[in-house]
Amino acid sequence: MVKVTKSVYIEIEKDGQKITFGPDEIEDIKRQLDAAIREKGREFQAKLKAKRKVKALAKVTKVATVYHMSDKKKKEILDNVDKKLSGTPKTLSALLDGVSYVPNYLPMIRKMVEGQQNVAKKQVGKRTLYYLKDGKNMQL
């Protein structure tokens, strides 16, 4: 009867020195290498996750683009708004009807309209209505 067993020996020879590894030592080295590789993988994943978090935070804190409008366009918009303003409250889009503008300019236009001394605003639900402060026939 012949019995076959797993027995692998690794012999390393350099400069006249000889090292022999048996099955138990090979298994131990394998376990240590696996643990080291797993640990490096965890460190790599942690660094990768930190980089992603930094990139995500950088995107959140990005400053909004500031748009500039020419003085001629500002004057045209304010003249149109002044013509349409009355004692009756109107939304900003109703006041801007008849003048061309870029939607990105709306925050600037809103500040210009609210900055006028004779304009009052009233919040109704989600809408902001604008009207003349001294308007005699104010309705809602």
Image (cartoon, rainbow, N blue to C red):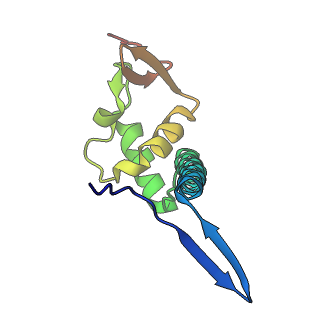
Q: Quadrant of residue 11?
A: bottom right
Horizontal relation, residue 52 to residue 103: left or right: right
Q: Quadrant of residue 90?
A: top left
Residue 12 percent location from the top left of the image: 62, 78
> Can residue 64 be seen in this snapshot?
yes
Residue 73 percent location from the top left of the image: 43, 58
In the image, residue 116 sits, relative to residue 4, either above or below, namely: above
Residue 131 percent location from the top left of the image: 42, 23
Q: Residue at x 60, y 52 (%)?
A: 32
Q: Residue at x 47, y 37 (%)?
A: 110
The one nearer the camera, 96 or 102, is 102
In the image, residue 81 sits, relative to residue 59, either above or below, namely: above
Q: Quadrant of residue 123?
A: top left
Q: Quadrant of the C terminus?
A: top left
Residue 65 percent location from the top left of the image: 51, 55
Q: Quadrant of the N terminus?
A: bottom left
Horizontal relation, residue 97 to residue 72: left or right: left
